[in-house]
């Protein structure tokens, strides 16, 4: 049965419909400048399809929380939950088929990216038995899949971009249909935008955005000027779920709900004399003690401890059995073995840390580790050592402690690269190639690997030299460790330097 969602009307007055089943298979990209009616379009789509398909909305401004009152969506305030909690929430929402709105309002850009990535990861990583059809709407998608690095950390950008790429590139087989909306096509990562087969393009004025929109719709560049003439709430449409030929002037219909923040309207200023205004605006500020204090968020850990203390008289304290050194060593070996298995999988070096950690936790639980599973911060440190090919014997070596101290001055995502080079220098192995450095950093870009080496050298940690044959040698400053000459353009690594499968 075909489900046709009525989105509005064409310029000729005919109903403009969207094939929901086709949309689930082909995804949708919505573009329009601020005020073009982009959020209104998304709201119309969500309202018309809520009875047919489960929905998840990534909402950076809290615009869609009003869907809860009318249609029963569960609103999740991301500010009140950890990344791990949001990942589990995503899994449970998928399992129980509950439509949700992830409200990211109140968070800075980095935390919005991290929490959105965690929630999307939970939707994506759920077991195959729960791959029910789901519409995943991401408003302001350029924030979560930026075309270039911005003010946020590299790690946060990788997590968010990886989650968005999974949604748009690999989500279809898992039942996830991505609907992404952006103000600026030029700021949206091309590999994310390119996966959409349906397009609704609204009013835009910048030449670069008009040119990309025209290319996506199969229009000639000279026709791109038409995007400037579109009215608010009017879009050009193309795609198997919308129209096989570019359809101009599609006007979006009304909605039952509205955003909490209505569009500002002009209103007259209040009548007041200049003296009255001066007295009000320039009055002495209230004393600091008189300012209302923001109520701190409840400490769940303290609440649990208090509850435990309250029943201590009726329930005996659990007896903690001591863990022997042999058992600790066995657990450590078990965790190391699990991490090696995770890293041995194809493309493990290029997957986001959050995705790797989820797989690591699942494997640990299967092995029966229970509460002994390392947390995310410990996992990051373990992953850094593993990608550098460091065993526990080398980490505990006195000479290596100095390397760890030097690595700590670098950003966390670069420390593994420095340690890999340090290990090659300590063992006298050939200098790692650009491909090996890029893989240790989690990237396919050889230019990024070269920039990484330059950055580490600028920090005064290493010195890079090329001989007459173009082979590279890296020397660690003050330690006097130096790698053997190695070809920076080599594609394969010597067996002893293959860090992606080395035991940590």
Image (cartoon, grey):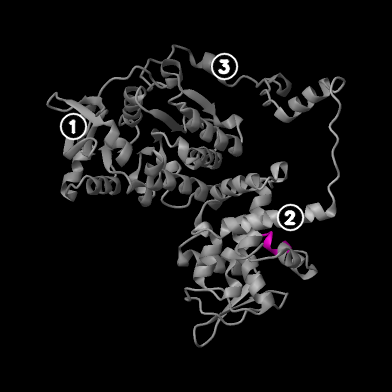
The structure residue drawn at horizontal position 69% and vertical position 75%, both measured from the top left corner, is: 426
**Which mark's residue is nearer the viewer, 1 or 2?**
2
Majority SS type along the magenta span: helix
Residue 411 higher or lower than 143, as above or below: below
Q: Which mark is residue 280?
A: 3
Which quadrant, please, contains the C terminus? bottom right
Position of residue 255 in the picture relative to residue 465 (left or right): left
**Which mark's residue is nearer the viewer, 1 or 3?**
1
Q: Quadrant of residue 290?
A: top right
| Residue identifier under label 1 | 249
Residue 182 higher or lower than 345, as above or below: above
Position of residue 210 in the picture relative to residue 454 (left or right): left
Q: Which residue, as the protein is rendered here, is positioned at the far bottom?
A: 468
Position of residue 92 in the picture relative to residue 320 (left or right): left
Q: Which residue, as the protein is rendered here, is positioned at the far left?
A: 12
Residue 391 higher or lower than 125, as above or below: below
> Percent from the top left, x then y, of residue 353?
56, 51
Q: CA distance from mark 1 to mark 3?
A: 50 Å
Q: Quadrant of residue 71?
A: top left
> Percent from the top left, x then y, of residue 68?
45, 20
- The image shows a total of numbered marks equal to 3
Q: Say few, some or many: other residues with alpha carbon within 10 Å of mark 3 (under 14 / 14 to 19 / 20 or more).
A: few
SS label for mark 2? helix
The structure residue drawn at horizontal position 47% and vertical position 73%, both measured from the top left corner, is: 491
Q: Verify whether residue 406 appears in magenta.
A: yes
**Which mark's residue is nearer the viewer, 3 or 2?**
2
Q: Which mark is residue 334?
A: none
| Residue identifier under label 2 | 332
Residues rendered magenta in the picture: 405-409
Mark found first going from the N terminus, 3 or 2: 3
Q: Say few, some or many: other residues with alpha carbon within 10 Å of mark 2 (under 14 / 14 to 19 / 20 or more).
A: some
The structure residue drawn at horizontal position 68% and vertical position 57%, both measured from the top left corner, is: 336
């Amino acid at each position: 049965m075909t489900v046709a969602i009525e989105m509005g009307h064409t310029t000729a007055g005919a109903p403009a419909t969207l094939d929901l089943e086709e949309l689930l298979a082909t995804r949708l990209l919505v573009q329009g400048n601020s005020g073009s009616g982009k959020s209104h379009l998304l709201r119309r789509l969500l309202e018309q399809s809520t009875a047919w398909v489960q929905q998840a909305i990534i909402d950076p401004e809290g615009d869609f929380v009003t869907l809860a009152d009318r249609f029963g969506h569960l609103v999740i305030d991301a500010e009140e939950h950890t990344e791990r909690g949001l990942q589990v929430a995503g899994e449970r929402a998928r399992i129980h088929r509950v439509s949700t709105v992830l409200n990211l309002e109140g968070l800075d850009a980095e935390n919005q990216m991290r929490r959105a990535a965690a929630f999307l990861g939970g939707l994506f990583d759920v077991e195959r038995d729960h791959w029910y059809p789901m519409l995943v709407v991401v408003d302001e998608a350029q924030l979560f899949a930026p075309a270039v690095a911005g003010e946020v950390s590299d790690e946060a950008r990788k997590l968010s971009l990886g989650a968005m790429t999974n949604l748009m590139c690999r989500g279809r087989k898992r039942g996830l249909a991505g609907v992404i909306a952006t103000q600026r096509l030029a700021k949206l990562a091309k590999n994310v935008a390119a996966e959409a087969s349906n397009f609704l393009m609204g009013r835009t004025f910048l030449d670069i955005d008009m040119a990309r929109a025209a290319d996506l719709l199969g229009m000639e560049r000279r026709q791109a000027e038409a995007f400037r003439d579109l009215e608010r709430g009017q879009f050009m449409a193309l795609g198997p779920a919308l129209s096989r030929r570019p359809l101009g002037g599609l006007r979006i219909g009304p909605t039952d709900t509205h955003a909490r923040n209505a569009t500002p309207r002009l209103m007259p200023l209040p009548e007041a004399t200049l003296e009255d205004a001066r007295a009000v605006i320039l009055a002495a500020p209230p004393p600091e003690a008189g300012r209302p204090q923001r109520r701190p968020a409840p400490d769940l850990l303290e609440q649990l401890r208090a509850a435990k203390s309250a029943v201590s008289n009726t329930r005996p304290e659990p007896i903690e059995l001591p863990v022997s050194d042999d058992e600790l060593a066995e657990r450590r070996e078990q965790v190391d073995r699990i991490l090696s298995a995770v890293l041995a999988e194809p493309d493990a070096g290029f997957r986001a840390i959050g995705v790797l950690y989820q797989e690591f936790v699942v494997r640990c639980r299967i092995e029966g580790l229970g509460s002994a599973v390392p947390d995310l911060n410990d996992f990051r440190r373990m992953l850094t050592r593993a990608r550098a090919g460091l065993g526990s014997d080398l980490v505990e070596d006195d000479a290596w402690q100095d390397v760890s101290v030097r690595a700590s001055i670098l950003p966390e995502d670069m420390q593994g690269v420095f340690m890999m080079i340090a290990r090659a220098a300590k063992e006298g192995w050939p200098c790692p190639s650009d491909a090996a450095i890029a893989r240790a950093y989690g990237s396919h870009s050889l230019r990024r690997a070269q920039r990484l080496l330059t950055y580490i050298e600028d920090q005064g940690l290493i010195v890079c030299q090329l001989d007459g044959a173009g082979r590279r040698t890296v020397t660690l400053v003050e330690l006097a460790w130096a790698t053997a000459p190695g070809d920076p353009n080599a594609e394969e690594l010597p067996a002893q330097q293959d860090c992606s499968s080395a035991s940590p």
